[in-house]
Image (cartoon, rainbow, N blue to C red):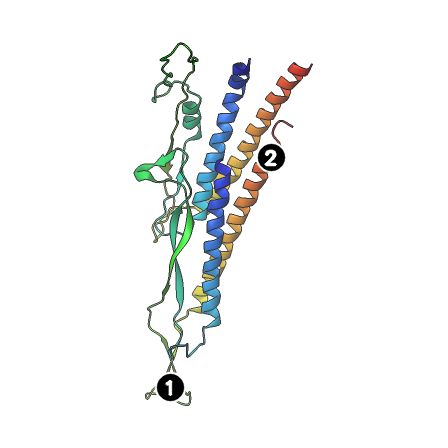
Amino acid sequence: MIGQLDNLLQLQSEALKLRAQRQEVIASNLANGDTPNYKAMDFKFSDALRQAVGMPSAQGSAPALVQTSAGHMNAQGSTLSTVQLLYRTPTQARVDGNTVDTNVEQANFADNAVRYEASLRFLNGQIKTMLSAIQG
Amino acid sequence: MSLDKVFEISGSAISAQSQRLNVVASNLANAESVAGPDGKAYRARQVIFQTLPVGEQNGMQGAQGATTAGVQVAGIVEDQSPMRKVYNPEHPMAAEDGYVEMPNVNVVEEMVNMISASRSYQTNVEVMNTAKSLLLKTLSLGS
């Protein structure tokens, strides 16, 4: 039962976690808008989410935990997913070697914040649905 | 939680930008200071920004180990460009040839620097506000 609840909420919670990470990356870009030689970074959300929820990807499936005693429970190991950060392709050259375009980053930041809230609402909806199913 | 780190990153940026604003204020205030504590004219100062890796990393990595980072001021350097010379033989600080050494502060450049610093400051405050409202909404999840 608990496992089913876990499965239900897994997708949205992983999405939420990745949105928070992306928020951090974009905040880092905005913070370093004036740092010489800083290169703006980002990651591909769809790929990261696919990897986080263990959908078939180039990375392979999650490793199962080894059971060496009869008392051990059967558990599927979670993928220790590493988000692959990529450098943004600069649109305009700057003399100081910095590739941050503040306008682009601000747009991405706002977009990501809204999507974070969307994930939050979906999660809230799912929790409410389950609560009403439990309490009647 | 990654959103906590947004505060760390933007906070470091705000602190760095305010330091830059401080240096700009010092330059503008001393744009006409003919003699400093060492008896020489004031030299313009500039801050040097540097990335500052934040906390322990949470499974994010890019090429050559690049990760998210805040900003720090690595140092403040004096502008080595030649001093401005003004011909004024009556001035007490004038040399034998009648020229007075004035600070090498470029007021226009400093004004541009000031606007740039305040814009960056505003951006980072906005980032922190957004992160704060997202965190507060996350705290009320399921209620």
Q: How many residues crowd mark 1 within 10 Å: few (<14), some (14–19), many (20+)?
A: some
For image coordinates 38% across by 77% down, the residue present is B38
Q: Is residue B39 above or below residue A34?
A: below
Quadrant into which the C terminus of chain B falls: top right
Disc number lying in front (1 or 2)? 2
User: What percent of the width, then of the height, locates residue B117?
Assistant: 48, 57
User: What percent of the width, then of the height, locates residue A109?
Assistant: 50, 40
Kindly give the residue lying farthest to the bottom in the view shown.
Answer: B90
Q: Is residue A135 above or below residue A31?
A: above
Kindly give the residue lying farthest to the right in the view shown.
Answer: A136
In this view, the residue in front, B14 or A104, is: B14
Separation of residues labelled 1 and 2 (CA atoms): 65 Å
Give the residue pinned by disc 1. Answer: B94
Which is more N-terminal, label 2 or label 1?
A: 1
| Disc assigned to residue B137 | 2
- Residue B120 in sight: no
Left or right of A132? Residue A68 is left
| Disc assigned to residue A53 | none
For image coordinates 35% across by 53% down, the residue present is A96
Q: How many residues crowd mark 2 within 10 Å: few (<14), some (14–19), many (20+)?
A: few
Q: Is residue A43 above or below residue B90?
A: above
Question: Which of the 4 quarters of the picture holds residue A58?
Answer: top left
User: What percent of the width, then of the height, locates residue B19?
Assistant: 46, 59
Q: Chain of mark 1?
A: B
Q: Amino acid at mark 2?
A: Lys
User: What percent of the width, then of the height, locates residue B123?
Assistant: 51, 49
Q: Amino acid at mark 1?
A: Ala
Q: Is residue A78 above or below residue B12?
A: above
Left or right of A132? Residue B111 is left
For image coordinates 40% across by 24% down, the residue present is A51
- Residue A5 in sight: yes
